[in-house]
Image (cartoon, helix red, strand yellow):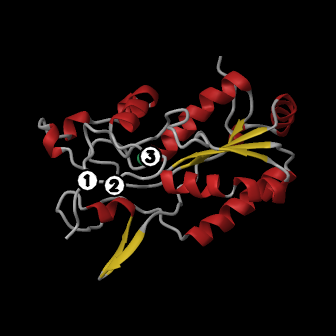
Amino acid sequence: MCEKVLYEELTPGEFRSRLANAPIAYLPLGTLEWHGEHLPLGSDGIQSQGFFVELAQQVGGIVLPMLFLGPDRADTVQEEFYGMDLYGFPAGRPQQLAGSAYWVSDDLFKQILRAILKQLKRARFRIVVAHGHGPSTRLFQDHIEEWSELFGLELFTCWREDESDGLGIQTDHAAANEVSLMMALRPELVQMENLSQDPEQWRSGGRQLPRWKWSPVSLRPVSIP
Ligand SMILES: [Zn+2]
């Protein structure tokens, strides 16, 4: 039988025992965000949580509930657009993509993360690993030094300092990497039949971001007029 690793499912006794074995908290940085027509809206959190559950079962630690609020690029072109809204899929201009409901400002997200870290420190964790949605992970990564010192915690993402893909988890948006992870973790949630037979039509758009690689197969830049 698999060990219980989800924070919300543990009794205090199970919590104490897991914490004593490995004082590690895993924080899945999710969104509720359009991920093409073929992936579920919670793809980011589902992938992070799925990976962390496997990790916790192998090396110990406790997996927190996934966050669904996160920062992203934002712009106002008559109305507010966030993240992938701005990349012009499929109409060639910014548009509100179906199902996206996650955006908070960087400042608010920092406050949320600081509040979580304070609580995790108080609960006697010593290591926190956070990973998932690109902009959320980047913000966490950018504050590792500051927050390690502030809270007395060891903090990690699954990226590497050298800006390589690190562990290769969630390195694109709704493309080969994320689809592969979703197919491995929750195949019943992937609907590849919703994609056109013609890969040329698979444009999700996107620019090269630091520490991110877009899949050359399914993502190509779209210019926004
Ligand atoms: Zn994603």
Cα–Cα span, label 1 and label 3: 14 Å
Q: Pinpoint residue 146: horizontal percent, then vertical percent.
A: 75, 59
Sequence-earlier tag: 2 or 3: 2
Cα–Cα span, label 2 and label 3: 9 Å
Which residue is painted at 49% across and 34% down in the image?
A: 168
Say which element carries label 3. Answer: loop
Say which mark, if any, is on residue 212: 3
* Residue 143 drawn above or below residue 14: below
Quick one: which residue is furthest to the left in this view?
A: 198
Name the foreground residue: 207 vs 152. 207
Say which mark, if any, is on residue 66: none
Sequence-earlier tag: 1 or 3: 3
Name the amino acid, label 2: Arg
In this figure, which residue is indicated by the disc labeled 1?
221
Name the foreground residue: 102 vs 151. 151
Which residue is painted at 47% across and 51% down in the image?
A: 210
Q: Residues within 10 Å of mark 3 (few under 14, many from 20)?
A: some
Q: Pinpoint residue 212: horizontal percent, then vertical percent.
A: 44, 46
Quick one: which residue is furthest to the top in this view?
A: 1
